[in-house]
Image (tube, rainbow, N blue to C red):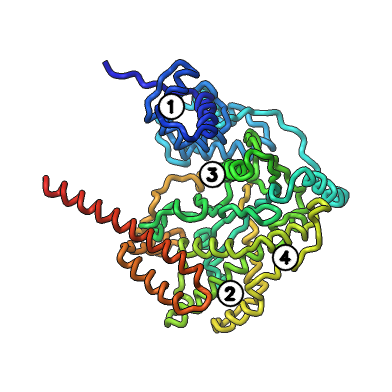
């Protein structure tokens, strides 16, 4: 007789994960015994393994169905995401009845090419959709009035009062910015870059977050257009110090924002050992928190039309980050031109842009971050001392950037201010007119393959992925390259600490090499048996 599989409910999984976090030295068998004692059911070791792999996700998730034992995968994931985005955007500004949601679901299904018989859009289907996402349709409240000068004047005392309950290391701000990662400091080239739909392909959205003393910078959230461009082939994206998400517009969608919120909660809970933290956010349309439960995070929204002056990320942190990125970009351009390439043919790929983004974020020092927070004057008096340097007074200097732009010898050079402050990069999300929103969601969530292959009809289409697959680097080549770096450092005067890192990398490559050889031996053994 086949063995009956036993499942835990969502609330039981949540309780077990809390127990496992506090008792992380136990074996799988001991966890099985604890569950049997607790709920009189016996699970397999494999069940324990599966739950523990998702423990952080389970602990940070909202228990919308605490007694549910299994999650049935949705039939059309793209439709699910699109309809959820519609609800999150409009639930505060319109009365969404069941009839409206059903009609919008049908419109989305038609636009996404879902076959007619796939879903019945019954009352039961809609109820399960709402339960899956914790959606409770509410009555519409009156619109809040626009911010006036009195509100702006009262903002600083209010913020100071809120921040007084937290030490600087537990006060955070997150903000997004767009980045045209291929943008050259040339008017004619930039006009071509930003024309039509090309600017969507060559644009990334980036969310940066840090606390008030600069001691904790979260990995950047980067939103691109392609899930797996050619340049990602042979690359383990999960090993990069980023969170990478995609949609056809590279926008910060509400669904992505809420996913980031849960990741933020997980990180700060672990870092600050379950102490409460404050997260300051602006009123970007995608910043919807209705229905999101975060156990250790208190969110405060800054008043509209005030963030340019009182939001720390806008007070110099993002501009400093972009200065570093533009510096790396134009230095790369200069090196390519010196190799004999034409500036019009230069095409930085997304992977290279990500490498420059992470490097630029690393260059932002705790001092710069702390000064930008102090510059806003929103922190309590005991930490609001005068900044020790101007928020944006960090390298690279403007004169240095200007000189590199001059060295590029472009025909119609931009001023450095134009190059660093493109107003179109301020947009990270937009809600089209009501009658266009369903079309907008269909465009974003339309099914596409992970790897974009260009056919003849797309050869000149600005939507196509034009990056190139990178070759696999074997252990031998990596070791040889490392020896070149080692020799370089041994010839320097101040490289003792860096040489220790070289030894660590050498050890890592050696271990990888042994693993590859073992796998080769195993493969050869089984090939001989065939």
Q: CA distance from mark 1 to mark 2?
A: 62 Å
Which residue is at the front of the view, 430 or 49?
A: 49
Instruction: Give the secondary structure at mark 4.
Output: loop
Residue picked out by circle 3: 441
**Picture layout, residue 356 above or below residue 235:** below
Residue 435 visible somewhere in the drawing? no
- The earlier-in-sequence mark between 1 and 4 is 1
Residue picked out by circle 4: 391
Residue 15 visible somewhere in the drawing? yes
Q: CA distance from mark 2 to mark 3?
A: 33 Å
Discs 2, 3 touching: Cβ within 8 Å: no
- The earlier-in-sequence mark between 1 and 2 is 1
Residue picked out by circle 1: 30
- The earlier-in-sequence mark between 2 and 3 is 2
Instruction: Give the secondary structure at mark 2.
Output: loop
Task: Tell which tag, 1 or 2, sits nearer the viewer.
Answer: 1
Discs 1, 2 touching: Cβ within 8 Å: no
Which residue is at the front of the view, 52 or 4?
A: 52
Q: Residue 522: horizontal and vertical position, in percent?
A: 20, 49
Q: Residue 182: horizontal and vertical position, in percent?
A: 52, 67
- Callout 4: 10 Å neighbours few (<14), some, many (20+)? many
Instruction: Give the secondary structure at mark 1.
Output: helix
Quarter of the image with the N terminus is top left
Q: Residue 218: horizontal and vertical position, in percent?
A: 59, 52
Q: CA distance from mark 1 to mark 3?
A: 48 Å
- Callout 1: 10 Å neighbours few (<14), some, many (20+)? few
Instruction: Give the secondary structure at mark 3.
Output: helix
Discs 4, 3 touching: Cβ within 8 Å: no
Residue picked out by circle 2: 185
Tell me which residue sits at (39%, 55%) in the image. Answer: 452
Discs 2, 4 touching: Cβ within 8 Å: no
Task: Tell which tag, 2 or 4, sits nearer the viewer.
Answer: 4
């Amino acid at each position: 007789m086949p063995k009956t599989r036993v499942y835990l409910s969502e609330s039981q999984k949540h309780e077990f994960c809390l127990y496992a976090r506090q008792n992380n030295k136990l074996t799988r068998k001991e966890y099985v015994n604890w569950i049997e004692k607790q709920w009189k059911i016996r699970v397999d070791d494999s069940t324990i393994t599966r739950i523990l792999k998702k423990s952080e996700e389970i602990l940070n998730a909202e228990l919308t169905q605490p007694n549910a034992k299994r999650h049935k995968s949705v039939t059309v994931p793209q439709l699910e995401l699109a309809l959820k985005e519609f609800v999150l955007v409009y639930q505060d500004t319109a009365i969404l009845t069941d009839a409206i949601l059903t009609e919008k679901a049908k419109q989305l299904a038609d636009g996404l090419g879902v076959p007619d018989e796939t879903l019945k859009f019954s009352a039961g289907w809609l109820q399960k959709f709402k339960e899956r996402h914790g959606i409770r349709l509410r009555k519409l409240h009156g619109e809040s009035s626009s911010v006036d000068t009195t509100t702006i004047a009262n903002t600083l005392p209010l913020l100071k009062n809120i921040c007084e309950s937290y030490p600087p290391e537990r006060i955070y701000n997150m903000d997004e910015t767009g980045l045209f990662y291929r943008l050259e400091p040339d008017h004619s080239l930039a006009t071509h870059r930003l024309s039509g739909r090309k600017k969507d392909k060559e644009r990334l959205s980036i969310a940066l977050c840090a606390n008030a003393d600069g001691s904790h910078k979260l990995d950047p959230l980067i939103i691109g257009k392609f899930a797996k461009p050619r340049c990602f082939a042979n690359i383990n994206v999960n090993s990069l110090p980023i969170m990478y998400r995609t949609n056809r517009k590279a926008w910060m969608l509400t669904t992505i924002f809420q996913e980031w919120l849960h990741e933020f909660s997980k990180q700060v809970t672990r870092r600050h050992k379950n102490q409460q933290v404050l997260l300051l956010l602006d009123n970007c349309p995608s910043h919807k928190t209705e229905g999101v439960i975060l156990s250790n995070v208190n969110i405060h929204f800054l008043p509209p039309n005030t963030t340019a002056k009182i939001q720390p990320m806008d007070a110099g942190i993002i501009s400093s980050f972009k200065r570093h990125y533009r510096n790396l970009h134009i230095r790369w351009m200069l090196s390519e031109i010196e190799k004999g390439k034409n500036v019009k043919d230069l095409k930085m790929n997304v992977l290279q842009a990500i490498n420059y983004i992470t490097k630029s974020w690393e260059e932002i020092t705790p001092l710069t971050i702390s000064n930008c927070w102090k510059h806003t004057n929103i922190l309590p008096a005991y930490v609001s001392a005068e900044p020790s340097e101007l928020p944006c007074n960090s390298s690279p200097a403007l004169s240095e950037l200007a000189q590199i732009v001059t060295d590029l010898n472009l025909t119609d050079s931009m001023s450095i201010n134009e190059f660093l402050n493109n107003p179109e990069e301020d947009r990270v999300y937009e809600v089209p007119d009501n009658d266009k929103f369903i079309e907008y969601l269909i465009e974003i969530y339309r099914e596409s393959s992970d790897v974009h292959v260009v056919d003849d009809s797309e050869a000149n289409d600005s939507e196509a992925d034009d990056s190139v697959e990178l070759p696999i680097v074997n252990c031998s080549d990596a070791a040889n390259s490392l020896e070149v770096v080692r020799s370089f450092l041994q010839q320097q005067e101040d490289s003792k600490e860096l040489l220790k890192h070289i030894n660590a990398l050498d050890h890592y490559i050696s271990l990888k090499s042994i693993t590859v050889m073992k796998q080769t031996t195993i493969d050869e053994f089984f090939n001989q048996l065939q």
